[in-house]
Image: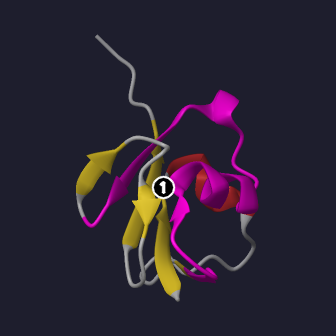
């Protein structure tokens, strides 16, 4: 099983040679929650990442499935 991970903003900086078009392919053994993927990617919860799966915003306890496209981006602030 595998998921495709697309990173935005400063999350990209953690991965030398990050492919902005295709992202990163991550192999997973079974369905797993988003929070476990964030841990694998060393993305700190303090960075408050927003996550979408297949274009839909989800919570960190949402389960990943084979061939999901996961987008991880920082919260957007402003006024």
Q: Where does residue 62 sit, x and y in percent of width and height? A: 42, 51
Q: Which residues are magenta?
A: 25-54
In the rendered image, which residue does mark 1 sit on? 8
Describe residue 15's horizontal placement relative to residue 79 as left or right: right
Q: Where does residue 51 sit, x and y in percent of width and height? A: 42, 49
Is 50 in the magenta?
A: yes
Pointer 1: residues within 10 angstroms few (<14), some, or many (20+)?
Answer: some
Residue shown at the point (46%, 79%) measured from the top left: 4
Describe residue 19's horizontal placement relative to residue 52 as left or right: right
- Quadrant of the rendering where the C terminus is positioned: top left
- The foreground one among 32 and 4 is 32
Is 35 in the magenta?
A: yes
Q: Residue furthest front?
A: 30
Q: Where does residue 55 sit, x and y in percent of width and height? A: 23, 60
- The foreground one among 29 and 27 is 29
Secondary structure category for the residue under label 1: loop
């Amino acid at each position: 099983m595998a998921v495709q991970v697309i990173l935005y903003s400063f999350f990209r900086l953690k991965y030398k040679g990050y492919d902005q078009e295709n992202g990163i392919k991550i192999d997973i053994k079974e369905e797993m929650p988003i929070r476990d993927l964030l841990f694998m990617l060393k993305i700190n919860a303090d960075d408050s990442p927003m996550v979408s799966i297949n274009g839909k915003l989800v919570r960190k306890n949402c389960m990943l499935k084979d061939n999901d496209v996961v987008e991880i981006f920082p919260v957007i602030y402003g006024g």
